[in-house]
Image: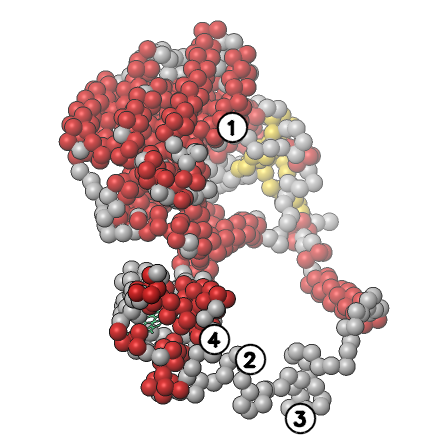
Amino acid sequence: MSEHNTNIEYTHRGIPPVLSRVSSALLLIGILVAIISYLTDPVRSAFNNIVLLMLLTSVGVGSLFLIGIEYLAGAVWSTPFRRVFEFLASVVLVIPVIAIPVYLNVHSVYHWSHTDAVAADKILSGKEPYLNETFFLIRLIAYFVVWIVFYFIFTSNSKKQDKTKDQKLTKRNIRFSALFMPLFALTLTFSAIDFLMSLEPHWFSTIFGVYFFAGTVLASLAAGTFLVIMFVQKGYFIKGIIKDHYYSFGALLFAFINFWAYIAFSQYMLIWYANLPEETFWFINKWEGSWMYFSIFLIITHFLVPYFALLSQPSKMNEKRLKFMSIWILFAHIIDLYWLVLPTFNPEGFVFSWNEIGFIILGLGLILTMFNWKARKENIIPIGDPKLKRGLDFRL
Amino acid sequence: MNKKYLYGGVGLFDSPDDIIKAASETSEKGFKKFDVHTPYPVHGMDSAMKLKPSKLAYFSLVFGLTGTFSALALMYWTSSIDYPVIIGGKPFFSFPAYVPIMFELTVLLAAVMTVVTLISIFFKFPNISHPLHDTQYMKAVSSDRYGICIEPDENHTIEEIELFLKSLGAKDITKIYYDDEELKYKNVILQPKFLLFLALIAVIVSGATYFSLNKLMFMQPFNWMREQAKVIPQESSAFFTDGFGMRMPVEGTVARENLPYLFKNQPEEAGKFLINPLEANEENLNLGKKKYDIYCSPCHGYFGEGDSRLRGQFPNPPSIHSEKVRNWSDGRIFHVVTEGQNIMPSYSTQLTNNERWATILYLRVLQRSFNAKESDLR
């Protein structure tokens, strides 16, 4: 089994034309709507911008995590698909750009950015050493630097291997993955705290970072699964991808659906049980008015439907089912982000119109555009990776 | 001599790739009864053998759901119907509190019962014998080789099987026989006599342990005056005719600081005859403020203006700065706090007599602060 990738047959075919058409359409419409939205309602747009930012973070940084975990665990089944996640990880390059409008509108979305309000508030002035504009900016830059640096390290080593077939590059990436994991945990946790939790600066939940992590892995995995299946179906991938590979995607998605529900419920139950006003108000806000229906909707779309849809073994291998569910899960994650952000904007009830749709379209457009940009010119299979052959021969 | 029956033909291979190839060719060829034996799980075997997904999962599902709903039923019955206790002010039917138990029981029943089902239905426990046991073949496949075993069926005779194995490139092809006795073999461990014997030993050992530790060798290392000639709570006593050590209090006993209230339903009399026994000193006023803030302020507001913090979940009370209340005597207010008034509940169980009087002192302070006299301002 150890012969060295001698009989890998792969020719680079770029991307299916439909994908590039869809992505440019989404991107154009998205940018247009976002600009109009900013001109008409800047505050609402800034809140939507946070949803967009966190969506890109989930997909981009989550993909980096999946790359790192593959190296660290020495996984072989996922090696043929690693490039898909490397391409998706290129989304981290646009995250800083998308963060700029949020930073410029910091006063309209983050209550803690008003120094007078902080001074009048005992709790907020206690948090002031952490929650202030300067430190906020420093932290953002630190996150972006970490993500982008590791993106370039992982992908450039991997790309170099296509030509040199040098096994040492795998070793090097394994070392960097070990370094990346703790940094990933810290940056992801704190970015969740900074962008999402600090929307309600009085509120705190120590499990919040894990909650966002669960959604992050789901979003990146779902995006990758969808693209893999689509590329295989249209013949743009390598031959030899079988049900057993799909099963692994399905099983991981299923596991993280459960993990998300477990964490979300843990967070809810502890707060519900202790019943302390300084914690409960966050959930009460999400139960006020029509937000109640939205919260129930979240439980159904993010847990019940995917749980039963992926419960049985055959359903995890079913190409069609998996393709549909990966899109479903990606949207469920967007709904989750929306549920985390928008109640602060409009506590009375949930609002949904062209502004929200526009930003979601922009998010999908950006992800696809970045992916296409990479996939058009680079191999979508890591043809120099020593684990590739074993990955293709993977059987359950 | 026992009669020998033919079980099937077996052949051995040297590598996992060979056995995968053999398995897929065998299933291709239409053999129905065959099995593969390897020293460790070989990936890809399911599809090579064309195995259908196991039915075991349905058992897991059913038992898992049984766990979910029995936990729900258990929690519902115990905490909402049979023994309702208020915990942390939560409703008797508190679904979030049940979820962890439902989850645990789901996992427990699904996991344990899946194993039990596997052993008892699929492996037909307590039958633990198999024709392949104690064969050269079994020895080989449990150390370093990969074997396939094909049983004859209506379309394939044993000779055909042997030829087929040879064509696959198998080595050490042999026929496997088993005898009567093997079929009927029951492990001694599972004989009822033996099980009864085990149970008997368990009873004897535990009984003997209890007797020797608690009776025979019982010794208290230090008794720290534990044995005394007094009656301790819950102890029985031969002295009293009813046999209880604990007695009911004598008729008319009152708990300390809880003198019975003499002016039930007589607000006017209370106002006339009750006098505040406390002095308005710092200590009493501090006590009054503390109690007022805890017990009265949720409805009456911190300053008694009737600005409740209960967000409309309880009707707002009138202000205590009204002409009427200001002219009331302390005793009259004491009556309200003790007995309650219309929808305001009684506070006699939360506040002792003295605490009530202290609260009233503080209430007077509040009133005075809203209607300060000229002299107070100086």
Question: Which residue is at the front of the view, B374 or A117?
Answer: B374
Q: Is label 4 or label 2 in front?
A: 4
Q: Is label 4 or label 3 in front?
A: 4
N-term mark: 2 or 3? 3
- Please identify the quarter of the rendering in which residue A44 is found: top left
Q: Residue at x 38, y 32 (%)?
A: A132
Three-letter amino acid code of the residue under disc 2: Arg
Q: CA distance from mark 2 to mark 3?
A: 29 Å
Q: Position of residue A78 (x, y in %)?
A: 45, 25
Question: Which residue is at the front of the view, A213 or B233?
Answer: B233
Q: Are marks 4 and 3 in contact (CB under 8 Å)?
A: no
Q: Is label 4 or label 1 in front?
A: 4
Question: Which residue is at the front of the view, A240 or B18?
Answer: A240
Q: Is label 1 or label 2 in front?
A: 2
Q: Residue at x 79, y 69 (%)?
A: B224
Q: Which residue is mark 1?
A: A182
Q: Which residue is mark 3?
A: B241
Identify the secondary structure beneath mark 3. Answer: loop
N-term mark: 4 or 2? 2
Three-letter amino acid code of the residue under disc 1: Pro
On the same chain, marks 1 and 2? The answer is no
Q: Residue at x 70, y 86 (%)?
A: B237
Q: Chain of mark 4?
A: B
Q: Which residue is mark 4?
A: B278
Q: Chain of mark 2?
A: B
Q: Are marks 2 and 3 in contact (CB under 8 Å)?
A: no
Q: Which residue is mark 2?
A: B256
Q: Chain of mark 3?
A: B
Three-letter amino acid code of the residue under disc 4: Leu
N-term mark: 4 or 3? 3
- The quarter of the image holding the C terminus of chain B is bottom left
